[in-house]
Image (cartoon, rainbow, N blue to C red):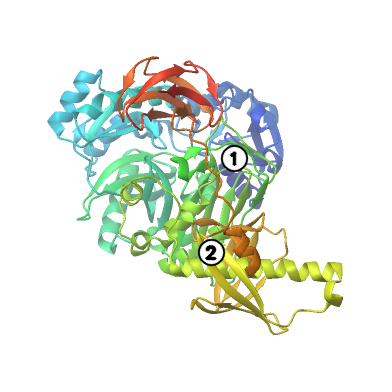
């Protein structure tokens, strides 16, 4: 086994690899850019080497710098993580020539499976089910339109060297092709240095289900069940689970056997993933093979008990797999939520800045009970940079069945507190409560179908409202009790009688009565007929999460102090709750509402980014829906469109300008 390895990556995946290496007694070397000098993976590794400026193209993607770091530190092998150089055949070749082991598959497998066009041709020869389409490289827009119309809309335009949803567009009609083709090529070029794209039939209401495979260099190959990855946004996965709620044992076996057949055909070794799209009739089609560790690998580890990173180490060291196919048993259910630095109510646009507070839920769990796992690469006080993927963490839960895993995830998300940047926790929490998600009725179009106008917050049900009103009243009562004790008001005596308050939440006043009985329980009576609630919880003013039980049900509620109340979030619904005495509530109702500034005459930059192009000129009349400009953020190109008919009065920036969030791009008249 290796004595020292280098991890050619950053963030949570670098930290994840370090954990297994440390457990196995293997020393680790981290590499970092100038922007990552204080990053968590640098702190966690035994050694660290600076490899250049912040842009990945000048640091993490420079092969010679990685090899030089290996020589400098004596690292015998390199684990590439995912992204960056993980599926770069040139990198694997150069490592081999330098006498350094690549902890991944053979070069041939990377070359064949890493190219989406060639991999589909190879899969067809291996008798693996494939999607109808044209696998040749598309030269121009005219040819792309001709092919699309021959296949029949809708079609998917995909980058040949793509991944992570980049360089991918769906065209539903002829008018979508020109812009979709251009955008796919542009994103592919900027993300992978390869602008080749191809076109295939888009399967309506597809599910995205993938098979984890594991193979050694001695001809042994197994599959470790499947992962359902259908909840996606802009072709990027948001939630994953294992196993899939859709598959039966027969389909699972058929998909697994085809995945193994493909891996054997390419003489695969290491951990890899064969991705399929599955239609409503359980017909499945090969999508691609990822010749690396997947972002969502933790859910497979949780239901199988297999450490995939450890197996990658052992295979790369030349060991035989000790696991046989019959040894793989699927135990319980696991769910992964990807926590991103993005604003869900502003079209999921990236958010950057400092993590002023970062308080994830406690990891672990009781024996034979639900488990929480949080793979992360950040820490409180750290920076979310504009240069890299906006992922903050991967929060996972494991339980005996799907509903228990969902319930545990919902509670864990409610306990996950982040301050300083925008994040998608409220969206993920709302998804956990969504009836369609809970029923397992999924497709890759789920988010677009259920949130056609974007996410504006979870649904405020009667149960959620009652919970939030109750907790707001308890928070206020806890603070007032503490004040009396500190200032010795009323002789420091505990209040053992009913206290009346009015909680103003979501435009409604709710009269409540808080009753103490001298014990740990508080009784909150809703005076409007909403019922009585027995509350027991532990909360200290200033703590960002209230945790406790309400009528025997466990609940976590996020808390931020505001004037006269609290900004609280629960179940994907963030709201301001104001707590008044009866007289204060009467006076508050007379206060004028603050008017929100009208910004409808301006196009504001929705996220920190680079202006790629301006599609209009000053004085030009434009129609609603027309493209105004393209802004690139975190390697994704975002087309900004007109919301209404208007005239461009003034353009306040130019292509190549870097803009801050809400900076004015243009003004309308």
Mark 1 Cα-neighbour bin, 10 Å: few <14, some 14–19, many ≥20:
many
Foreground residue among 7 and 149: 149
Picture residue at 43% right of the left edge, 52% below the top = 239
Discs 1/2, front: 2
Q: Quadrant of residue 647?
A: top left
Picture residue at 63% right of the left edge, 45% below the top = 18
Q: First in sequence: mark 1 or mark 2?
A: 1
In this view, 477 is above or below 531: above
Q: Position of residue 584 (x, y in %)?
A: 65, 64
The answer to whether 455 appears left or right of 260 in the picture is right
Foreground residue among 581 and 354: 581
Q: Secondary structure at mark 2?
A: helix
The residue singled out by tag 2 in the image is 411
Q: CA distance from mark 1 to mark 2?
A: 25 Å
Q: Quadrant of residue 331?
A: bottom left
Picture residue at 40% right of the left edge, 14% below the top = 618
Q: Position of residue 279 (x, y in %)?
A: 23, 51
Residue positioned most to the bottom: 517
In this view, 469 is above or below 85: below
Q: Position of residue 143 (x, y in %)?
A: 19, 20
Q: Which numbered dot is residue 521? A: none
The residue singled out by tag 1 in the image is 11
Foreground residue among 653 and 268: 653
Q: Position of residue 81 (x, y in %)?
A: 53, 39
- Whether residue 323 is visible, yes or no, is no
Q: Look at the image and tell me in which quarter the N terminus lies.
A: top right
Q: Look at the image and tell me in which quarter the C terminus lies.
A: top left
Mark 2 Cα-neighbour bin, 10 Å: few <14, some 14–19, many ≥20:
many
């Amino acid at each position: 086994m290796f004595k020292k390895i280098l991890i050619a990556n950053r963030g949570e995946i670098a930290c994840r690899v370090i954990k297994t290496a440390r457990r196995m007694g293997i020393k680790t070397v981290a590499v970092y850019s100038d922007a990552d000098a204080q990053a968590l993976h640098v702190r966690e590794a035994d050694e660290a080497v600076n490899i250049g400026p912040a842009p990945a193209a000048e640091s993490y993607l420079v092969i010679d710098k990685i090899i030089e770091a290996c020589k400098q530190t004596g690292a015998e092998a390199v684990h590439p993580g995912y992204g960056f150089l993980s599926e770069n055949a040139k990198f694997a070749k150069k490592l081999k020539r330098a006498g350094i082991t690549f902890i991944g598959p053979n070069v041939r497998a990377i070359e064949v499976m890493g190219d989406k066009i060639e991999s589909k041709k190879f899969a067809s020869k291996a008798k693996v089910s494939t999607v109808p389409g044209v696998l040749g490289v598309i030269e121009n827009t005219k040819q792309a339109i001709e092919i699309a119309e021959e296949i029949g809309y809708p079609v998917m335009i995909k980058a040949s060297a793509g991944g992570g949803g980049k360089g991918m567009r769906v065209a539903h009609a002829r008018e979508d092709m020109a812009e979709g083709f251009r955008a796919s090529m542009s994103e592919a070029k900027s993300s992978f240095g390869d602008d080749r794209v191809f076109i295939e039939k888009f399967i309506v209401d597809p599910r995205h289900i993938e098979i984890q495979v594991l193979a050694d260099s001695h001809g042994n190959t197994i599959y470790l069940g499947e992962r359902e990855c259908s909840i996606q946004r802009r072709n990027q996965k948001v939630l994953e689970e294992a196993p899939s709620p859709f598959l039966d044992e027969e389909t699972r076996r058929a998909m697994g056997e085809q995945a193994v057949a493909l891996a054997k055909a390419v003489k695969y070794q290491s951990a890899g993933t064969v991705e399929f799209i599955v239609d409503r009739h359980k017909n499945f089609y090969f999508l691609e093979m990822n010749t690396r560790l997947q972002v969502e690998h933790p859910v497979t580890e949780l239901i199988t008990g297999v450490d995939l990173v450890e197996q990658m180490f052992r295979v790369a060291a030349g060991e035989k797999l000790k696991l046989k196919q019959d040894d793989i048993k699927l135990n319980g259910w696991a769910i992964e939520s990807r926590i991103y630095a993005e604003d869900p109510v502003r079209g999921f646009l990236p958010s950057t800045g400092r993590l002023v507070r970062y308080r994830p839920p406690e990891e672990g769990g009781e024996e034979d009970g639900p488990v929480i796992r949080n793979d992360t690469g950040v820490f409180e006080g750290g920076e979310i940079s504009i240069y890299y993927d906006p992922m903050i963490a991967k929060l996972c839960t494991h339980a005996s069945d799907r509903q228990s895993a969902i319930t545990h995830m919902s509670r864990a998300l409610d306990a996950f507190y982040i301050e300083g940047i925008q994040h998608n926790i409220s969206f993920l929490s709302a998804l956990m409560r969504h009836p369609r998600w809970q029923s397992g009725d999924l497709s890759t179009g789920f988010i677009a179908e259920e949130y056609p106008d974007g996410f504006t917050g979870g649904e405020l049900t009667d149960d959620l409202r009652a919970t939030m009103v109750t907790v707001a009243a308890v928070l206020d009562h806890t603070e007032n009790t503490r004040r009396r004790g500190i200032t010795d008001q009323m002789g420091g005596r505990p209040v053992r009688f009913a206290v009346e308050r009015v909680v103003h939440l979501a435009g409604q006043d709710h009269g409540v009565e808080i009753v103490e009985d001298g014990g740990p329980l508080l009784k909150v009576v809703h005076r409007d007929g909403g019922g009585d609630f027995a509350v027991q919880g532990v909360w200290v003013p200033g703590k960002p999460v209230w945790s406790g039980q309400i009528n025997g049900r466990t609940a976590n509620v996020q808390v931020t102090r505001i004037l006269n109340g609290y900004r609280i979030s629960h179940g994907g619904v963030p709201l301001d709750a104001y707590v008044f005495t009866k007289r204060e509530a009467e006076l508050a109702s007379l206060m004028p509402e603050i008017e929100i500034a009208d910004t409808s005459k301006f196009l504001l930059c929705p996220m920190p980014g680079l202006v790629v192009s301006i599609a209009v000129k000053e004085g030009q009349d434009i129609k609603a829906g027309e493209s105004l400009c393209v802004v690139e953020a975190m390697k994704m190109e975002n087309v900004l469109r007109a919301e209404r008919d208007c005239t461009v009065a003034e353009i306040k920036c130019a292509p190549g300008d870097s803009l801050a969030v809400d900076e004015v791009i243009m003004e309308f008249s």
